């Protein structure tokens, strides 16, 4: 490996972070094109290593994208999990291209899906969850081009069957979708699957791009009573068993409304390892239930004429934490929050020609839109997107195509914690087996930094910048300086791009939407 190029820029301190946070919050999110940053080992920090492919012969007629909210990759058998959470996804994985390292660009629903749909980074598109002390909904900026818009302009039919909450038309996530099915409340995954299949199977359906989104795996973890006994410890008699049985005795609407409230999480500070394991087991059971239901989508494609010309993409917007780093759910940017599944099952003829297998090259959710566009034969070169098409990685023996280089992976999360703690900004960059995290809390003007050697410490338990960790060795010091430079450049690039994309509109929360978000657990609860 060539020596890493270093840049004479100090790491972002509290004052610099203040400016970054203020501009990010106020401008938040840039038209077309990418500002070139400093090269590091020949890799552009933000954009693609090669020019986007122009319009060509489509590799597929249709694409079905399944977004399973809150599904961390390492809880699937396809990614090495030793429990039978996902036999149907595992079977699909054996027929797919499986990306072993795929990262989300945020750890919450709204910003991550916005990156998925627009191939823009969070600091450019500016969409954030309505959460905690939020009083307004921020929409996609005016100059951004969504994947659905690009496809619809070419006559491809577009439909999304989502579960609302922080994936909503109120944020203009529906741009370009001819059908945007967003019900009130939080529907069971079976409802979303039924609606998706009804639409796909309508007579004389043209070429299509269809999205299914479900919160089924999201907290509260309340799997069907006949599914969780196979996963939980039967000897467990802690407080969460009684709580689970009490919630499961309620109606589905009451289960969800109560389960996302403080009662479900009461006493979590004092939960034992057995309590946490029980909660984690319920999460596994929810995954298995979801897997059993989305099998119907796989059957609808793989056992009909659609198998010859339809791609299935399976992805998640972020993962989930079970006190891996002292918290629950997904309000940080560690690997359990950012590592997500990404599987692409190609049309039958290509699958049989070897367009399947495992790929170790790290990829990102911003790559999904350009990949989908190229699969469908569309030219996306004028969209200004930040991702790059993964089509060169899909074919036989395509692990390291000429000119393909690993890019840094960036993530960002903004939390509005209310009048007490105030705003908190999380940013991270991962590259070549190392990861740097920068956290800034505005009200107290404080910065926290972490550095991890992911090859030696994949669970991020040994922070090399922690107090008492000692001085960095030469390699770690070089990596630290390089990652700080990359993150600094990435933040600056996104701020400039946000200005080009234009100021997004905001909309005050109406009572109906506020009530829905409270029901979904996004408002009124503590930060977890």
Image (tube, rainbow, N blue to C red):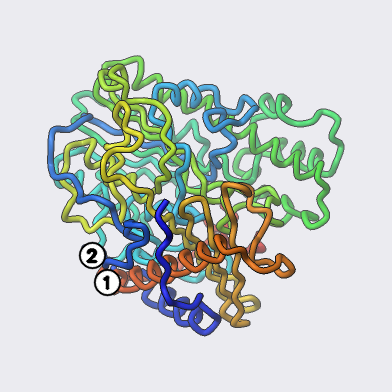
Look at mark 2 in the image and give the residue it sits on. 143
Q: In this view, does 211 lie above or below 348?
A: below
Classify mark 2: residues with Cα within 10 Å, few (<14), some (14-19) or many (20+). some
Q: Nearer the viewer, residue 156 or 501?
A: 501
Measured as percent of width and height from the top left, residue 180 is found at: 33, 45
The answer to whether residue 122 is seen in the rendering is yes
Q: Position of residue 149 (x, y in %)?
A: 22, 50
Rendering coords of residue 26 (x, y %): 40, 78
**Residue beneath the point at 68% across and 53% down:** 461
Secondary structure beneath disc 2? Answer: loop
In the displayed structure, does residue 310 sit left or right of residue 181? left
Quarter occupied by residue 382 = bottom left
Tag 1, which secondary structure?
loop
Q: Which residue is drawn at 48% across and 81% down?
A: 16
Residue 45 versus residue 335 in the image, above or below = below
Q: Name the residue under label 1.
A: 502
Q: How many labels does the image show?
A: 2
Q: Point out the residue furthest to the bottom here.
A: 15
Mark 2 vs 1: CB contact within 8 A: yes
Residue located 64% across and 30% down the image: 224
Q: Where in the figure is residue 380, as x and y percent of width and height?
A: 19, 49
Using the image, determine if residue 328 lies above or below residue 221. below
- Would residue 518 be visible to someone looking at this image? no
């Amino acid at each position: 490996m060539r020596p890493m190029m270093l840049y004479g820029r100090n790491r972002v301190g509290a004052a610099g972070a203040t400016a970054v946070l203020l501009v990010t919050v106020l401008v938040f999110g840039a038209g077309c094109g990418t500002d070139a940053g400093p090269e590091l080992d020949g890799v552009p920090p933000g954009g693609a290593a090669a020019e986007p492919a122009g319009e060509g012969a489509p590799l597929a007629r249709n694409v079905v994208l399944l977004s399973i909210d809150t599904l961390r990759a390492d809880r699937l058998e396809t990614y090495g999990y030793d429990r039978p959470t996902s036999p149907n996804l595992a079977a699909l994985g054996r027929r797919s291209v499986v990306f072993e390292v795929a990262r989300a660009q945020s750890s919450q629903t709204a910003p991550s899906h916005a990156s998925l749909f627009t191939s823009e980074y969070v600091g450019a598109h500016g969409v954030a969850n309505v959460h905690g002390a939020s009083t307004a909904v921020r929409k996609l900026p005016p100059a951004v081009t969504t994947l659905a818009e690009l496809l619809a302009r070419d006559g491809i039919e577009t439909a999304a069957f989502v579960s609302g909450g922080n994936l909503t038309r109120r944020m203009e996530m529906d741009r370009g979708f001819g059908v945007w099915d967003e019900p009130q409340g939080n529907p069971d995954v079976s409802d979303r699957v039924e609606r998706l299949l009804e639409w796909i199977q309508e007579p004389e359906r043209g070429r299509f791009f269809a999205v299914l989104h479900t919160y089924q795996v999201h907290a509260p973890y309340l799997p069907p009573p006949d599914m969780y006994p196979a996963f939980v410890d039967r000897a467990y008699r802690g407080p969460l068993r009684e709580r689970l049985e009490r919630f499961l005795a309620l109606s589905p609407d009451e289960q969800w409304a109560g389960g996302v409230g403080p009662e479900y999480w009461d006493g979590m500070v004092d939960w034992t390892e057995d309590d946490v394991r029980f909660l984690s087991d319920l999460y596994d059971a929810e995954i298995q239930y979801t897997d059993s239901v989305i099998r119907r989508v796989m059957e609808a494609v793989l056992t009909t004429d659609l198998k010859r010309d339809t791609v299935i993409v399976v992805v998640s917007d972020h993962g989930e934490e079970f006190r891996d780093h002292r918290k629950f759910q997904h309000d940080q940017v560690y690997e359990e929050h950012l590592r997500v599944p990404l599987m692409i099952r190609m049309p039958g003829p290509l699958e049989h020609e070897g367009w399947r297998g495992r790929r170790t090259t790290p990829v990102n959710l911003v790559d999904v839109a350009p990949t989908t566009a190229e699969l469908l034969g569309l030219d996306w070169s004028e969209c200004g997107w930040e991702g790059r098409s993964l089509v060169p990685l899909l074919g036989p023996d395509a692990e390291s195509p000429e000119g393909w280089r690993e890019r840094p992976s960036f993530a960002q999360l903004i939390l509005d914690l209310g009048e007490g703690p105030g705003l908190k900004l999380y940013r991270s960059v991962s590259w070549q087996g190392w990861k740097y995290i920068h956290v800034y809390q505005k009200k107290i003007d404080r910065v926290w930094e972490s550095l991890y050697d992911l090859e030696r410490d994949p669970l991020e338990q040994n922070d090399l910048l922690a107090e008492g960790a000692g001085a960095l060795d030469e390699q770690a010091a070089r990596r630290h300086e390089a990652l700080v430079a990359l993150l600094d450049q990435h933040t600056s690039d996104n701020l400039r791009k946000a200005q080009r994309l234009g100021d997004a509109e905001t909309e005050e929360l109406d009572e109906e939407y506020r009530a829905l978000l409270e029901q979904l657990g996004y408002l009124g609860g503590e930060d977890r």
